Image: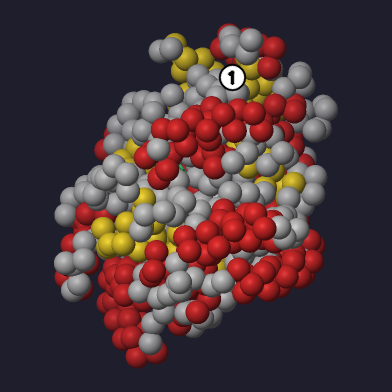
Amino acid sequence: RLEERGIVTSPEAFEAMNFDFVIVGGGTAGLTVAARLAEEEGWTVGVIEAGQYRPNDAIIDVPKNFGTAVGNANYDWIYTTVPQTNLNGKQVRHPRGKVLGGSSAINFEIFNRPAKGEFSGWSALNLGLGSWSWSGLLPYFKKSETYKPPRPEDVFPLASTTRRRAFQRRQNTTEAADAFFTAADSALGPTALNVDDLLAAASDGSDTVSKRDDAYHGSSGPVHASHNEWYSDLANPYILSMNNLGVSTNFNPDSGDNVGIYNTPASVDRDAGVRSYAAPAYYAPNAGKTNFLVLTGAQATKINWKSSDDNGLAVAESVSFVVNGVSYSAKASKEVILSGGVFNTPQLLELSGVGNPSILNPLGITTKINLPGVGENLQDHPYVSLSFTVKPGYHTWDELRNNATFAAQAAAQYAATKDGILASNVGVLSFFPLQSFLSTSKILSIVSTLVSDLVSSTSSMSLLRIAQSVLQLAWLSNQSIPQVEIVMIPGFNPTGTVTAPAAGTNYMILTAALQHPFSRGTVHITSTDPLTKPAIDPKYLSNAFDKTVLLEAVKYIRNTIATSAPISNFIATFNDPPASSTSDAQYEDYMKVALESLKHPVGTSALAPKELGGVVSPQLLVHGSKNIRVVDAGIFPMHISAHAQCTTYAIGEKAADIIKASW
Ligand SMILES: Cc1cc2nc3c(=O)[nH]c(=O)nc-3n(C[C@H](O)[C@H](O)[C@H](O)COP(=O)(O)OP(=O)(O)OC[C@H]3O[C@@H](n4cnc5c(N)ncnc54)[C@H](O)[C@@H]3O)c2cc1C
């Protein structure tokens, strides 16, 4: 029963409470900050969450089920963008978690960190105040996690099912093992490395385990991070191809140096074999606390104000929320903390009169705080996927779709031991500066077009955007700040490709994602009805730099990576875009159809001075307010070269310390 798990099921009971802190949104950052504030026994913390608590739900918990909650209203807000001008009017899907745990419950479990130089940008925008630098955030990355390193046999480049089995057999050689090696070698094909080479690599791998720097990792935090223990047969040849192309394996990618190809941690509790996310990590262990209450199925609709303080700062006193069409309010004697995420936090601010009067006035909303940055500065990681059919005989996720017997065995294995292919997720990531795949002359031509575009549009740019452009231009020559991510997905993936999978066929998908787009978008309300979705306009590819770099990344995948041995020997055909597409114009057409969001929208409550167009101070207080903070991924002032959840947890942890210190 939910009550036994600490969930408040009565909105009346929640309304009757006198909370110190009311937190809107029990998501990734919201539950993190809530749990830490509830460590103070004298404080009461109330969380308003629109979704439900869904413990022991296989759609969330089974690692390989990532993606299946997307589009399902029991888990997802199911947002889409407005038609995108540069994508022939395409409306891009934007799932967001609507469940206790928020997007951490429905994301793809990649758990990685950005480049340290990117936080120098955050810090520079905030004049160094509040320590929003790598060293100011590293303690919180560590505090949030319990990290389990990869097993020696999972260190690249030995991580594939066939190779790892061969490695284990070779440890005590028998006739049967030799027969196995022979079979494995012939399965991998004549141009694949032989087992002895891989064994030599494995001993290097073992060394790299001991060279891994544990100083960067946490060992007792709430979120479990671990590495896959199942790998497709594509992993090794792909990694070796990348190494041959000069993309080195990075054995310490969480150190603030994330360039190269690496085996990413995932938010998976490896011992339990289930997803680790904000609800089990930060809520469940505290569910019995009487000072930490969560109301689910309740949507916050408005901040209510009392008189401004002597300095003219707006003061929040409660939050209205609606349950089954009935309105209530929750009192906050100290603070209201907005953790509704990158789209819903600006929506709630605008509904409450915080934003740009030119957006609020036409809707008849009285401006309480004139703050034009609200809902601006939307940044995302747009991506394009290329799919390849794989020659028969290699092991990929597709076997779960193609082979009912194998799928049943995998399900039985998972039920019995919580491991195997169903406990796996995407393992192989790579991050590149432009210099890794473009010639100097190409980079110079891209940069000169970019500079002239920026100069000619300066008059229409916010100060924040001008400051960001200066920083981002400098990042282009800094080879420790990646501009592109390429993800290898070992099996067909339904998003980001065009052609449906053929029965009985296996696939490899290579996905290129921009890390630091120059395009900026917006999210704003279009109605005073809090249940009407806000208009999301990322303005994908509105800056020519973004289109050109994405196009070049697509060409690099298609013409260089996919044609380099040994991975080229595993590819049967180019599927999407088809082999007949070879010109830039054809690739651009494909991009317009295939472009998707990597689901990392950020920036709409930017951590930056008000004078620049920011929304929150280094203490995460909404500018012009006495007691409203934003604690979610909306505060990223500039994007990072990593998936967003690790940094969002770190923000939640850091916010809690800021708040504790201020009271
Ligand atoms: C499909 C998908 C895949 C992703 N894959 C990855 C990945 O592999 N790795 C990675 O690092 N990142 C990934 N991300 C991104 C990452 O999960 C998010 O950036 C991060 O979790 C955002 O955290 P948040 O705290 O800002 O918001 P959320 O975690 O989304 O939390 C917001 C919470 O607020 C609630 N809420 C919103 N409005 C209201 C309201 N008015 N009243 C009450 N409650 C409200 C929501 O229901 C939600 O629970 C993915 C995201 C998605 C959606």
User: What residue is drawn where x is 39% and y is 60%?
Assistant: 510
Q: Position of residue 101 (x, y in %)?
A: 57, 33
Classify 10 Å Cα crowding around label 1: few (below 14), some (14-19), many (20 and above).
many
User: What residue is drawn where x is 72% and y is 60%?
Assistant: 173
Please tell me whether residue 187 is drawn above or below residue 6 in the rendered image.
Answer: below
Secondary structure beneath label 1: strand
Asked if residue 524 lies left or right of residue 354, the reply is left
Q: Where does the N terminus fall, quadrant-wise? A: top right
Quadrant of res 77: top left
**In front: 318, or 407?**
407
Viewer can see residue 542 = yes
Asked if residue 636 lies left or right of residue 16, the reply is left
Q: Which residue is mark 1?
A: 295
The residue type indicated by label 1 comes to Leu
Quadrant of res 125: bottom right
Please tell me whether residue 589 is drawn above or below residue 241 in the rendered image.
Answer: above
Asked if residue 46 lies left or right of residue 380, the reply is right
Task: Give the number of marks.
Answer: 1
User: What residue is drawn where x is 35% and y is 58%?
Assistant: 391
Q: Position of residue 305 (x, y in %)?
A: 54, 29
Is the CB of mark 1 within 8 Å of ligand 1? no
Q: Where does the C terminus fall, quadrant-wise? A: top right
**In front: 246, or 178?**
178
Q: Position of residue 75 (x, y in %)?
A: 45, 29
**In front: 96, or 525?**
96
Which residue extends farthest front? Answer: 175
Please tell me whether residue 489 is drawn above or below residue 434 in the rendered image.
Answer: above
Q: How is the image coloured?
A: secondary structure
Which residue extends farthest right? Answer: 41
Viewer can see residue 338 = no
Q: Position of residue 331 (x, y in %)?
A: 62, 22
User: What residue is drawn where x is 33% and y is 86%?
Assistant: 442
